[in-house]
Image (cartoon, rainbow, N blue to C red):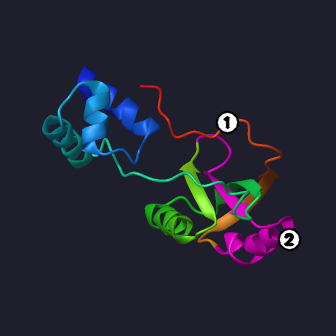
């Protein structure tokens, strides 16, 4: 479990993921080496899974966001693993969650247009392993989208 200094470091890193260990250390009151050691430990423990750059999908020609709610025909381990592998490999699927309740999975999909999404649905999404039923809801506008955890 991260201690108070780790949490300060993680908060700073979330806001500026491209910062160097020296810059992060300066922000939280550590010298470079102890800060670097903490970063490496947190990475080894899996607390830090990676660093990324946030891109604007709309500015890059991907203005359509669709949430696809999916039910599988079977619920055995092999079927679920095959579906999840297919979801991980598809570049337009940005997120995939297993769900409780009526749906088995929800996918967050981006596309260049509604027409392209229709093609993705027919050619790719409905071909994912063991899809029994899929319903889609188009996002009208994005109100909040963050990766910053409340730590």
Distance between the Cα atoms at labels 1 and 2? Answer: 25 Å
**Which residue is more in the foreground, 128 or 108?**
108
Identify the mark nearer the N-term, 1 or 2: 2
Examine the rendering and report whether any part of residue 3 can be seen: no
Question: At 31% across and 41% down in the image, what residue appears?
Answer: 47
Question: At 46% across and 64% down in the image, what residue appears?
Answer: 81
Q: Secondary structure at mark 1?
A: loop
Number of other residues with Cα within 10 Å of mark 1, as a class: few under 14, some 14 to 19, many 20 or more? few
Q: Secondary structure at mark 2?
A: helix
Question: At 20% across and 46% down in the image, what residue appears?
Answer: 40
Mark 2 sits on what residue? 115
Label 1–label 2 contact, CB within 8 A: no
Which residue is outermost to the top? Answer: 4
Q: Is residue 104 left or right of residue 147?
A: right
Q: Is residue 59 left or right of residue 73?
A: right
Magenta stretch bounds: 100-127
Question: At 57% across and 54% down in the image, what residue appears?
Answer: 96
Classify 46 as above or below 83: above
Q: Quadrant of residue 57?
A: bottom right
Q: Is residue 34 magenta?
A: no
Number of other residues with Cα within 10 Å of mark 2, as a class: few under 14, some 14 to 19, many 20 or more? few
Classify 10 as above or below 51: above
**Which residue is more in the foreground, 28 or 136?**
28
Q: Quadrant of the C terminus?
A: top left
Q: Nearer the viewer, mark 1 or mark 2?
A: 1
Q: Quadrant of residue 77?
A: bottom left
Dot label at residue 144? 1
């Amino acid at each position: 479990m991260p201690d108070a200094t780790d949490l300060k470091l993680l908060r700073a890193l979330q806001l500026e993921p491209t910062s160097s260990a020296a810059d992060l250390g300066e922000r939280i009151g550590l010298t470079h080496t102890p800060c670097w050691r903490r970063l490496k430990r947190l990475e080894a423990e899996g607390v830090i899974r990676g660093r990324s750059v946030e891109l604007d999908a709309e500015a890059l020609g991907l203005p359509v966001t669709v949430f696809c709610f999916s039910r599988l025909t079977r619920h055995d381990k092999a079927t679920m693993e095959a579906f999840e592998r297919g979801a991980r490999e598809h570049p337009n699927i940005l997120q995939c969650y297993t769900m409780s309740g009526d749906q088995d999975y929800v996918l967050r999909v981006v596309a260049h247009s509604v027409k392209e999404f229709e093609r993705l649905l027919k050619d790719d999404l409905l071909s994912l392993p063991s899809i029994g039923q899929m319903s889609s809801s188009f996002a009208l506008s994005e109100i909040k989208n963050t990766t910053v955890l409340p730590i």
